[in-house]
């Protein structure tokens, strides 16, 4: 089964037939883009356990609430804008504690929303992969046992830059 076939099977079985799949050699990773409801996959090759989990992860994103995706986009961009505004204000020796407080609240919301998107996708992608590629069950079960140690690292990966920016702001106060 190719990556595209697995992706289509998962989407169709979960009533997401309208989600498009684009496979290309030019795509360097696998990701879901909610604005055009498309999953982008790197070159089509046969699925091994890792690829099956990643594809299922992206399919789960396609099934998640579009409202969460929109909120993630909004709060992440506001967080970035406020961060750079505070850095510029610090450079010019101007401080605004209200803006810093607003930044901390927005950053917390951005991290929370991103967590609401990523954590379920990380956790359930193994179960989806086992369901749709049963011949990989044993390999996936071994991998899932080690993932419980990797989950905190995964959370740090997607929230890490925001957390670093929060620490920078807190250190500047």
Image (tube, rainbow, N blue to C red):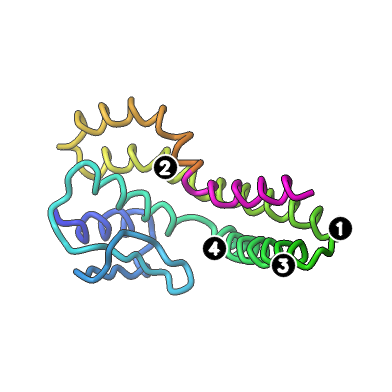
**Residue indicated by mark 1:** 98
- Res. 11 image quadrant: bottom left
Write down the region rendered in magenta.
157-173
Spatial separation of the CA atoms under disc 4 and disc 2: 18 Å
Q: Could you say where residue 142 lies in the image, as x and y percent from the top left?
A: 25, 26
Give the main secondary structure of the magenta stretch: helix
Dot 1 lies on which element? helix
Spatial separation of the CA atoms under disc 1 and disc 3: 15 Å
Sequence-first disc among 4 and 2: 4
Q: Nearer the viewer, residue 6 or 139?
A: 139
- The numbered dot on residue 14 is none
Sequence-first disc among 4 and 3: 4
Sequence-first disc among 4 and 1: 4
Q: Residue at x 72, y 67 (%)?
A: 88
Dot 2 lies on which element? helix
Number of residues whose C-alpha sits closer than 10 Å to that of mark 2, classed few (under 14), some (14–19) or many (20 or more): many
Relative to 28, 67 lies left or right = right
**Residue indicated by mark 3:** 88
């Amino acid at each position: 089964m190719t990556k595209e076939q697995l992706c289509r099977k998962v989407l169709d079985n979960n009533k997401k037939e309208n989600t498009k799949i684009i496979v290309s050699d030019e795509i360097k990773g696998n990701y879901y883009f909610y604005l055009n409801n498309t999953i982008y996959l790197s070159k089509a090759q046969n699925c091994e356990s890792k690829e099956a989990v990643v594809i299922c992860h992206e399919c789960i994103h396609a099934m998640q609430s579009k409202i969460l995706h929109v909120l993630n986009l909004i709060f992440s961009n506001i967080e970035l804008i406020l961060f750079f505004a505070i850095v510029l204000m610090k450079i010019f020796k101007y401080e605004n504690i209200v803006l810093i407080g607003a930044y901390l609240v927005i950053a917390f919301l951005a991290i929370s929303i991103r967590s609401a998107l990523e954590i379920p996708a990380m956790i359930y992608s193994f179960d989806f992969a086992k369901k749709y590629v049963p011949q990989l069950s044993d390999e996936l079960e071994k991998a899932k046992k080690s993932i419980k140690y990797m989950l905190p690292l995964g959370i740090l990966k997607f929230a890490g830059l925001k957390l670093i920016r929060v620490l920078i702001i807190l250190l500047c106060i």
